[in-house]
Image (spheres, rainbow, N blue to C red):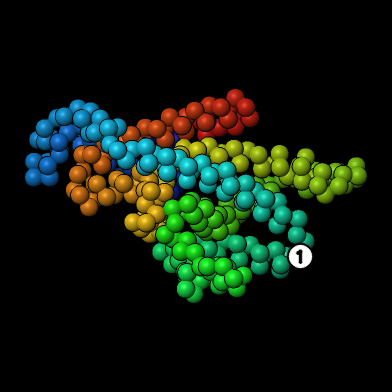
Amino acid sequence: MKQLLRNYQLYIFLFPMVAYFVIFRYFPMYGVQIAFKDFYPLKGIWDSSWVGFEHFQRFFRSSEILMVIKNTLLLNLFSLIFGFPVPIILALMINQVLRMKFKKLVQTVIYAPHFISTVVIVGMVSLFLSPRSGVVNSIIKSLGLDPVFFMARPEFFKAIYIISEIWQHAGWGTIIYLAALASISPELHESAVVDGASKWQRVWYIDIPGIMATAVILLILESGRMLSLGFEKVYLMQNNLNRSASEVISTYVYKVGIQQADFSYATAIGLFEAVICLIVLMSVNMLAKKATNTSLW
């Protein structure tokens, strides 16, 4: 109590975040029991009949489960493989730029898309890839080839999604790594220059080890989202022609839970997704702790 009274200002600053997690993260867990009941809104949660694992069994017997899980895993895996290294590379390159005006210009240009609405981003992608007036198809037609309706071709969906994700969010990740690079002592670089180290050697032996802890933490957090793919962009880019490659868990839950009002079934799928993400997060955290002595806890 004495510590609390002595540092009450810090606890006041902490209170809004604690309240946010209690209200929007922990309190809604009360509704998880819907996954184990045949929920009817008029009866409420407590008065709805208990059905156990019936909705989970229904999901595992569904003809679409393989497609949904496969698309979710592949999109997350490819985003991690191709998207995770990009902010690191950009940060290392920008850190070597000596002209501050050019450096600030590049930083502004690459992280500006992060602040653009997802709806606008998808609209821009659709315009770029339009078979009639899109820039990409204009180039294709100038080469004497037939235009391609990219948004209607399932084989192109994953590439379009991953490239747009990198374009939109790589700049924001770059800021995090630039902050980590700024914390590296300049004396290390000065000593390396005196010892005759080249620029590439300084990057390899000083910069990369200096941001390794940050990279590991971000990798753990990204791996914890292995089945939790963002809903907005996928849903906006989805249509009946590319659904075989674009239907993921989040869009499937929205359709069965909101559009079809099957709340119990949707909750069961969401709970399954959350449990798998928790297991993956804890596993990757444990492996990272053993391999690099860096972890979330």
Looking at the image, which is closer to me, 240 or 181? 240
Q: Residue at x 50, y 38 (%)?
A: 223
Q: Position of residue 155 (x, y in %)?
A: 47, 52
Total count of labels: 1
The amino acid type of the residue labelled 1 equals Arg
Q: Position of residue 135 (x, y in %)?
A: 55, 71
Q: Is residue 166 left or right of residue 265?
A: right
| Name of the residue lying farthest toward the top | 290
Quadrant holding the N terminus: top left
Q: Is residue 44 left or right of residue 157?
A: left
- Crowding around mark 1 (Cα neighbors within 10 Å: few <14, some 14 to 19, many 20+) is few
User: Disc 1 on helix, strand or loop?
Assistant: loop
Q: Is residue 27 visible?
A: no
Looking at the image, which is closer to me, 21 or 3? 21
Q: Position of residue 97 (x, y in %)?
A: 75, 59
- Vertical placement of residue 156 versus 57, above or below: below
Q: Please tell me in which quadrant of the rendered image residue 106 appears.
A: bottom right
Q: Residue at x 56, y 71 (%)?
A: 141
Q: Residue at x 77, y 40 (%)?
A: 205
Q: Position of residue 132 (x, y in %)?
A: 47, 73
Q: Is residue 289 left or right of residue 210?
A: left
- Vertical placement of residue 60 versus 132, above or below: above
- Vertical placement of residue 88 versus 61, above or below: below
Looking at the image, which is closer to me, 64 or 29? 64
- Vertical placement of residue 218 versus 145, above or below: above
Q: Please tell me in which quadrant of the rendered image residue 71 appears.
A: top left
Q: Residue at x 63, y 38 (%)?
A: 213
Disc 1 designates what residue? 99
Q: Is residue 205 visible?
A: yes
